[in-house]
Structure formats: structure tokens, C-alpha cells
Amino acid sequence: MRISHQPSQYSQTVRLLQITDTHLFADPYGSLLGVKTAASFQAVVENIQSLGVEFDAMIATGDISQDHTAESYQRFVDGISHWTQPCFWLPGNHDFQPEMQAVLAQSPLQRSDVVLMGEHWQLVILDSQVKGVPHGRLSEAQLALLDLALVTHSERYTLVLLHHHPLPAGSAWLDQHQLHNRDEFWTVVDRHTNVKGVVCGHIHQALDTHYKGCRVMAAPSTCIQFKPDSDDFALDTTNPGWREIELHHDGTISSYVGRLKGTDFQPDMNSSGY
């Protein structure tokens, strides 16, 4: 179990910035369903910077690359290089782990299983990728890692990170690609009292709900958005964005979703899938 420690700069509150589903290409003009993903990613980064968003660490919750190339991962590294805070990452279904690990291991980005954040919290970072398919699954080893982290640091509140959504998001086409062994995941969570939140990517839309006493959240993608509550594949005109998360000393969580303004990154609404 790879454990790292990150002190909080903001007294008793830990602040996180979630960036997800960037879907970058080697080609700087690479486009996904009508949106140039490098440009939309850079616009999100610049908007966050211009707003002066404060955070202790960034969390990149998967699907960094769309084309599996080393250049796409380097594009992500370069895009966030002006920030000095650590970035913790995990793979999504579109990521190619050999290239992902090779590039990110040589960068300031950090791969950890557990991050002790400040005095009161830990992040448990899980790999839900099933190679070659869009749905997710946590291996026995990943479930055991979660259980061990919750036991080892039982005095700490816990935020669990993974790519795939661990409960239905309300869109039939998308929910077939959720975490397939979500019941096993929640069984582990139920054995403990210190999991206060779960954060995922994958669904290309904002989600903020409660399940089994946990806050469950997802962030919008930095590129295309999926239309909520849609039985069939459908894109949304909602803008690219990010999520800010505050973990408080009493175990409560505050969160905010930010989005770009304007109409620069509208997708091809005639797209029927990708």
C-alpha cells in the first residue's frame, strides 16, 4: 500500500480540485465529438487560475487520454505545470496504463494508494479499470486495499476516489458502464464508519447525492458533457468544468462545481456515440 502525506495549507480544512475526463490526444487539435479537447482543457485550467481557486491537491479521476499516446499524457502534465500542488491520479477506461504510468511517473504527478490529507482525512485511490471495456470493476486486491486503509487509519475520515460511478446515475445507456461490482464495494464501505464521501469521473456530468450515509460526487468533463437522465446516448450543451471539494475537520464535505462561460466548446449534437 503506497501511502503519502500531504499537509493542509488551510488550517483545519482540506481543499481539493477535481479535474476529470480530459480525453486528450497527441494532436493538439484532436477533437472529440466536435470539441477540441486540448483547447477546452486549457481553457478550464486558465479559468481556474484566473479565479484564484485555492487547493491543497488536485485529483485527476481518469480518462486523461483519448488516443493512448505518451504525448497525450505529457500534454496533461504540461497543462497543469504552473501549479506546484501535488496531483494524484487514477486510470479510467480510456486510459492506456503502460503509457500513462511511464509518462506520469517521470512527472511531478503522484501515484498513491492512500494520501493522508492534513490531520483528519485520508484519500483512498482505487483502480476500477477493466482493460478493453467501458464498464468498471474493482479487483479483490483493490477491495482489500480499501478495507485495509479503512482499518489502518480508522481515526481518519475517508474520501474514496475511483473512475467509474458506484451507483446508477440515471441514464440507462451510461449506467450499463458503471462499476459492475458496486455491491461488493458498498459492502466494504458498510463495514466501517469513516467513509464520508466517494468521488468519481466517467459520467461527464455533475453528480452530487447521498447513498448509505456517504456523499457521492462526480465532476463535469473538461470537454464534452453527457445529457443527464437520458436512456439513449445524448450530449448536453452544458459547458466543460471542474469540481472543488472542501473536507472539514468534523467530517463534513462542501463542494462546488465551476464551469466555463460562453459557447466556445459546444459539441456536435448530431453525434450518436463515441
Image (tube, rainbow, N blue to C red):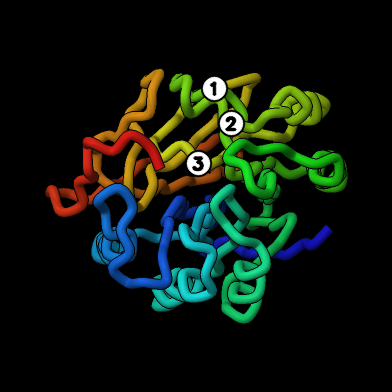
Query: Callout 1: few (<14), some (14-19), or many (20+) C-alpha neighbours within 10 Å?
Result: some
x, y (%) of residue 43?
26, 62
Q: CA distance from mark 2 to mark 1?
A: 7 Å
Relative horizontal placement of residue 6, taking residue 18 as reference (left or right): right
Q: Which numbered dot is residue 242? A: none
Relative horizontal placement of residue 135, taking residue 2 as reference (left or right): left
Residue 56 in sight here: no
Q: Which numbered dot is residue 202? A: 3
Give the residue type at disc 2. Answer: Gln
Q: Earlier in the sequence, mark 2 or mark 3?
A: 2
CB contact under 8 Å: marks 2 and 1? yes
Residue marked by disc 2: 178
Q: Residue at x 65, y 75 (%)?
A: 102
Figure check: 246 above or below 166: below
CB contact under 8 Å: marks 2 and 3? yes
Q: Which numbered dot is residue 168? A: 1
Q: Residue at x 66, y 47 (%)?
A: 129
Q: Secondary structure at mark 1?
A: loop
Q: Nearer the viewer, residue 7 or 238?
A: 238
